[in-house]
Image (cartoon, rainbow, N blue to C red):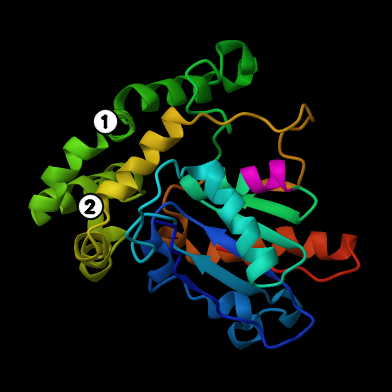
């Protein structure tokens, strides 16, 4: 038994450049045709500053896509952060690195900036959740919002009330759901694509933001690797092995952190996301003597 991880590692040509992992919930993001990793490893080829180059490490999350089968129980986002730190330092030899992620990848990146802040030079998130999100007692309270943020509080509460049924099911009965998803490619596609239609900026027209090839590639990766069960269990493990802080530091995430709020960032606005990542880590380059490396 163990945790087999598959990753891609496009590298910058300049030996002085270090690296950072980009982390997302689903491995399919790393294969997205519009998310050209050359924009990060070789920015000069796209008309940008060559000093903004990164090595990019793109691991599939345990139990997702090519990082299957997952035979070890108990793997959740904060334990994945432990794996990524081992991957970056002990396996790939990067002393310090940055982290970028969305969805569960945001939680993994934030955990790297919490537990391993001395190694993690910066964290860039496209979804922002408290690390204690899966603990029902640790969510945002009405008093956490300023008066001018009341609209955001209502929007958050509405989302939690109407859009989280899938997460509650996957966090409580993932195996029951897995039998259905492994039996029906149509059901699996509907389960995945409905979220893209509802959460993306497509105004109900899915193909405004995603091509048929992109949608079918996403569903095919789940279907062909038979990973729905283990990917759904990732929610169960988050809810049943709750995050606990390693220290009483404030802020909880000590690494410098940037947030650009998107739900399907690499797919919908790849250029904007890359430019935001560059700008954030560009400032950090100026503050340290050693160069930066990067994870997806």
Q: Nearer the viewer, residue 215 or 74?
A: 74
Instruction: Please indicate, yes or no, whether residue 133 appears anywhere in the rendered image.
Output: yes
Q: Residue at x 30, y 25 (%)?
A: 162
Q: Residue at x 79, y 29 (%)?
A: 250
Mark before the other along the chain sequence, 1 or 2 = 1
Q: Which residue is mark 2?
A: 205
**As drawn, which residue projects farthest toward the front?**
1
Main structural element of the magenta stretch: helix, strand or loop?
helix
The stretch of residues the image draws in magenta is 111-116
Residue 60 sits above or below residue 133 on the image: below
* Element marked by disc 2: loop
Where does the image place residue 6, in percent across and percent down from the top left? 44, 69
Q: Residue at x 56, y 39 (%)?
A: 128
Q: Residue at x 91, y 68 (%)?
A: 289
Q: Gap in Å between the C-alphas at discs 1 and 2?
A: 27 Å
Residue 231 sits above or below residue 288 on the image: above
Q: Is residue 112 magenta?
A: yes
Residue 38 sits above or below residue 5 on the image: below
Q: Nearer the viewer, residue 44 or 2?
A: 2
Q: Is residue 250 magenta?
A: no
Instruction: Please indicate, yes or no, whether residue 260 appears anywhere in the rendered image.
Output: no
Where does the image place residue 117, in percent across and percent down from the top left? 76, 47
């Amino acid at each position: 038994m163990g945790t087999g991880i598959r990753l891609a590692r496009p590298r910058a040509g300049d030996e002085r450049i270090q690296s950072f992992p980009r982390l997302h919930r689903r491995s399919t993001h790393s294969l997205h045709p519009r998310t050209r990793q050359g924009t990060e490893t070789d920015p000069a080829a796209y008309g940008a500053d060559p000093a903004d180059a990164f090595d990019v490490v793109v691991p599939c999350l345990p139990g997702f896509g090519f990082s299957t089968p997952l035979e070890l129980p108990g793997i959740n986002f904060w334990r994945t952060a432990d794996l990524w730190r081992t991957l970056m330092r002990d396996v790939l030899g990067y002393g310090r690195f940055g982290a970028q992620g969305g969805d569960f990848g945001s939680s993994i990146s934030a955990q790297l900036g919490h537990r391993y802040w001395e190694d993690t030079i910066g964290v860039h998130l496209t979804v922002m959740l408290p690390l204690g999100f899966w603990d029902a007692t640790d969510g945002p309270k009405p008093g956490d919002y300023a008066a001018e943020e009341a609209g955001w509080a209502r929007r958050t509460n509405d989302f939690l009330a109407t859009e989280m049924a899938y997460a509650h099911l996957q966090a409580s009965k993932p195996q029951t759901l897995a039998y259905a998803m492994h039996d029906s490619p149509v059901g699996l596609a509907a389960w995945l694509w409905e979220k893209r239609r509802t959460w993306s900026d497509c105004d109900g027209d899915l193909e405004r933001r995603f091509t048929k090839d992109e949608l079918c590639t996403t569903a095919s990766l789940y279907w062909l690797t038979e990973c729905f069960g283990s990917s759904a269990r990732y929610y169960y493990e988050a809810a049943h092995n709750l995050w606990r802080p390693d220290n009483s530091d404030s802020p909880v995430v000590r690494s410098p952190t940037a947030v650009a709020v998107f739900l399907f960032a690499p797919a919908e606005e790849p250029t904007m996301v890359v430019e935001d990542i560059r700008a954030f880590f560009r400032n950090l380059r100026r503050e340290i003597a050693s160069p930066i490396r990067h994870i997806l």
